[in-house]
Amino acid sequence: MTEFDGLPIRDDLRGETPYGAPQLDVAVALNVNENPYPPSPSMISDVAAAVAAVTGQLNRYPDREASALRADLAGYLAKFEGVSFDPSLVWAANGSNEVMHQLLLAFGGPGRTVLGFSPTYSMYPQYCRDTFTNYVTEPREADFSLDPEVAVKAVRSHRPVVTLLTSPNNPTGTALPIDTAEAVLEAASEHGGLVVVDEAYAEFRRPGTPSALGLRERHKNLVVTRTMSKAFAYAGARVGYLVADPAIVDAVRIVRLPYHLSAVTQVVATVALRHADELLAQVAALRAERDACVEWLRANGFSVADSDANFVLFGLFDDRHAIWQGLLDRGVLIRETGPSEWLRVSVGTPAEMTAFKNALLEVTRG
Ligand SMILES: Cc1ncc(COP(=O)(O)O)c(C=O)c1O
């Protein structure tokens, strides 16, 4: 806890601590929903060549509009999600964290409310704090699904400027039926509110779960956010994006810092998009590993939330911190987050998952 004694810091930031899970040096890090697979040798050499080429122009500011990258992101969505968008509907920034931050800079503010459904992503209150926006939550059901009637009622009573629907949701892994998203979009449009569907983990969803991208044409108040941090195994590159009506993109362009996305980031992202086939093959392997992990946990008597993401929420533990610590003592770092009796593990390589399972049995069975 930092008091910032003697500093003229904003009163509401006094006592706050920087956000973030511990970055510990452990053998098996399964705590921040990273993709465990590093880039392939061919991708590394393509990235290196692209960075070398752009380095000769680093005396110049980058393309403020990131036009080539936005066109390539639209191409990726057309090819892999089957939905075509003009690049003017796509916007990119340094991770979907920055995309959300920009959205709330443009649409949040004093006297305005953002609505989320808890438990959900722990950064949402922070974006709201930073933009002086009121953050309210309504609860999910016991199985972490969202009751459409509860959601619609909440939208009508809070009249949020932005409703956050996270699908798949973090930390629960729960995907949202498309009908629920549509009901919320309709309810929000009654008072002119936006609905952000945070699809950071969309590529990991199970077959039969559609993306909200397909709703864009019918619902002009929809924003879908995505990231290259997870499916593209590119958390270190910091690239996120959104798809929304061009007027929403224009509003975000007002508040973005000039040249927010470096020339290096823009080319490095473009190269990864060219390797989408190979990267998405790894996503398929991770989905299979995730399903195996859910099955294994259930077979061993744990409660497990259905997961459409690259992580699994499991429990129930009277003292989850002791379990977390026991795993850490065995070199396996997972995340103490979400409801108090649950823990979250990110899906790693087969060897990492074996280490996790062995450590968990040791800690819980003694
Ligand atoms: C639901 C959700 N949204 C957004 C993000 C932000 O991802 P990034 O800023 O790396 O794109 C995360 C990261 O874990 C997340 O879980």
Image (cartoon, helix red, strand yellow):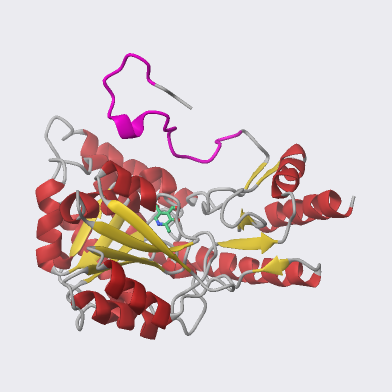
Which sits in the foreground, 347 or 17?
17
**Residue 100 at x, y percent in the picture:** 29, 54
**Residue positioned 26% across, 79% down in the render:** 187
Tell me which secondary structure the magenta stretch mostly adopts. Answer: loop
**Residue positioned 37% across, 28% down in the render:** 14
**Residue 20 at x, y percent in the picture:** 48, 40
Residue lying at the far right of the rendered structure: 366
The magenta stretch spans residue 13: yes
- Would you say 240 lies left or right of 86 here? right
Ligand 1 - quadrant of the structure image: bottom left
**Residue 68 at x, y percent in the picture:** 17, 56
- Would you say 214 lies left or right of 245 here? right
Range drawn in magenta = 4-24
Which sits in the foreground, 59 or 190?
190
**Residue 170 at x, y percent in the picture:** 49, 60
**Residue positioned 79% across, 72% down in the render:** 299
